[in-house]
Image (spheres, rainbow, N blue to C red):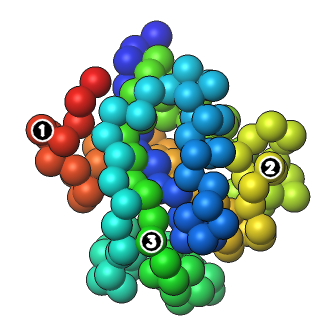
């Protein structure tokens, strides 16, 4: 299996409830290494760009509002098969359908406020990491 990097966001509903450490513990328990991390407040433009793929969806406006409602923690995670591993740790987008022990089952409030984001493929991971981190900020 290949060592990959994936991009993660701990969303405002998570930072608001002081869950950064609890979620990071689930990430590390899954064998993923947090090789870059910073807490930022996204601008509306940054959130719209980040989720541009969902622009035409009915939930886009609400999604952008939720991402700028408070600080987020952006991260780069490293590990074997990191992209799929992290998607598994996140659980289903809708927390009511997520398996127990996953971030979303344990912590999410709703489909919209589902606590964390993870890249879905190698190409999107690369793009998303590049939007938030310079190469010298990623220390494996
Ligand atoms: N989302 C939503 N309503 C929906 C589907 C998605 O509010 O019906 C939000 C949710 O916060 C989700 C994000 O939009 O995490 C991006 O959607 P995607 O389908 O890419 O889910 P993810 O990759 O985050 O599991
Ligand atoms: Mg997605």
Where residue 110 appears, x then y in whole percent?
A: 77, 70
Say whether disc 2 or disc 3 marks the residue closer to the N-terminus: 3
Q: Which residue is mark 3?
A: 71
State the separation of the CA atoms marked 1 and 2. 33 Å
Residue at 28%, 24% in the rendered image: 140
Q: Which residue is located at x 35 percent, y 46 percent?
A: 37
For the residues labelled 2 and 3, the Cα–Cα distance comes to 20 Å
* Residue 23 placement (x, y as % from top left): 62, 45
The quarter of the picture where residue 108 lies is bottom right
| Residue hosting label 1 | 136
User: Can residue 105 be seen?
Assistant: yes
Number of numbered markers: 3
Kindly tell me whether mark 1's CB lies below 8 Å from ligand 2.
no
Q: Residue at x 45, y 65 (%)?
A: 72
Q: Which mark is residue 17?
A: none
Viewed as shown, does residue 63 lie left or right of 100?
Answer: left
């Amino acid at each position: 299996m290949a060592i990959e990097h994936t991009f993660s966001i701990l969303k405002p509903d998570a930072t608001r409830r002081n869950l950064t450490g609890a979620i990071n513990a689930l990430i590390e328990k899954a064998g993923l290494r947090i090789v870059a991390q910073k807490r930022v407040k996204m601008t509306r433009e940054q959130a719209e760009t980040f989720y541009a793929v969902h622009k035409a969806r009915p939930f886009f406006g609400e999604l952008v509002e939720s991402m700028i409602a408070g600080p987020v923690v952006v991260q780069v995670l490293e590990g074997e098969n990191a992209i799929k591993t992290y998607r598994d740790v996140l659980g289903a987008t809708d927390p009511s359908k997520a398996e127990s022990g996953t971030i979303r089952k344990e912590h999410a409030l709703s489909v919209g406020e589902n606590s964390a984001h993870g890249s879905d493929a190698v190409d999107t991971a690369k793009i998303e990491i590049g939007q938030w981190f310079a190469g010298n900020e990623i220390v494996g």
